Amino acid sequence: MADRHRAGARRMRPRLPGSLGSRLFLILLAGLLCGQGLAFAIMLLERDRSARAVMLTTLQRDVTVAVALLDRLPAEERAGWLPLLDRPTYRYELGPGAAGTPGLPPRARMIADEIRTALAPRFPVRFDTVPAPTERLQGHVVLADGEALTIDVRPAMRPVASWLPVALGVQLLALAACVGLAVRLAVRPLTRFAEAADRLEPGRPATRFAEAGPDEVARAGRAFNALQARIARHLDERVRILAAISHDLQTPITRMRLRVETGAEGPDQDRLLADLDEVEALVREGIAYARSVHGDVEPTVRLDLRAFIESLVFDYQDGGREVTLNALADVTVATRPQALRRILANLIDNALRYAGRAEIDVRAREGRLAIAVLDRGPGIPADKLEAVLLPFVRLEESRSRATGGTGLGLAIADQLAAALGGKLTLCNRTGGGLEAVITLT
């Protein structure tokens, strides 16, 4: 029961927005609005006190003068002077006034004390409260000739100026705009830092983070650029080691092949030659993978993509391989032709090895060029689609070394695609098969 209560309390608890900018904006805006509201309340309180002090001072002075004047005027002239003595919050009446009750609320009692102070000791005053929608009190005075005079007081604050709510609204809008600008300036470096981290990928050209802005942002930018440089040096060192080992293995493999070929013929010789062929293929692929990391050594040229892909497809067809090309519009692209040819050749060979035929489809969308190599082979398990792009990763079943794969073909294609500024993605097709897409910008 207690667990359910706590779970319900967690569900009812308001959740902050997900982005840091939104959270900072709401927190700062709430704090500033609270401060602004407090300042406005203090201003209204001070205004009320100041207005009350001015009103009481004016009331005391006016009542003293008005009652003394009416007392000295002849009785027949008093009614003519009453309109001249009226004020917005109090007026004078000849006679006993309206019926009321003796009790006075706190503010009315304060006003009554001021009037008593102004008229004492010459004119004693009796006060009562008159029932009304708003606060109202009356003071009853008897003039020297015995005529009754009523002071009718209706206290009220002066209305707020009509422009004040507009000015307050404009102030709040300006406040929200300033908070939004401050939050944007504070969060924008973090956004750029996250984008730079997303672009960081081994094998792709490194994009330096701008070392500008506040000291903390510039320091983070320098650290990020240093990290990129260290990663690049580490990968370059590993690739150079792989290339050196693969290259150095070619000489002993050649000597071993010569010795086997000059030895006694028979089943053992055939098995040894098959093993040497496999080792030699693995070495060649290792060298190719090492070179693919440095795909930028080839100059970029403008390429007629239609003629380029048709030439590649015709080469396979001339060799009796079943490779087809869908309709392709005339497209010119700036790229490195040898690297692109190696990528497509690896993908086509992969499709032919596991499906027996390959299909090439070229799509141009929103300034991006996508070249897809399709097959109807066994496909790749969904949880292995990214792993097979790593070097020396092979699937245990149909896509194994027994079918001729070394585990480097897709890795080389992925590295070369990254060197071209593109990306290689794999996905399984509906109805079976694999779709390998290289996207170029």
Image (cartoon, grey):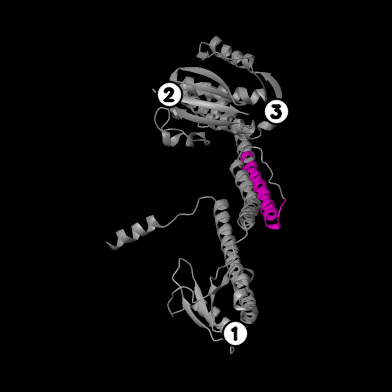
Tell me what residue is drawn at x 60 percent, y 38 percent: 242
Considering the numbered disc 2 on the image, is that residue within a helix, a strand or a loop? Answer: loop
Pointer 1: what residue? 119
Q: Residues within 10 Å of mark 3 (few under 14, many from 20)?
A: few
Query: Residue 274 in the image: x percent, y percent?
Result: 48, 25
Kindly identify the amino acid type of the residue bearing the numbered disc 2.
Answer: Gly
Kindly identify the amino acid type of the residue bearing the numbered disc 1.
Answer: Leu
Badge 1 vs badge 2, beta-carbon distance below 8 Å: no
Residue 87 sits in which quadrant? bottom right
Q: Is residue 337 left or right of residue 353?
A: right
Query: Residue 411 in the image: x percent, y percent?
Result: 54, 33
Range covered by the magenta-colored residues: 212-239
Q: Residues within 10 Å of mark 1 (few under 14, many from 20)?
A: some
Residue 317 sits in which quadrant? top right
Can the viewer see residue 262 in this picture?
no
Pointer 2: what residue? 433
Residue 157 is one of the magenta-drawn residues: no
Query: Residue 82 in the image: x percent, y percent?
Result: 60, 71
Q: Residues within 10 Å of mark 2 (few under 14, many from 20)?
A: some
Kindly identify the amino acid type of the residue bearing the numbered disc 3.
Answer: Glu
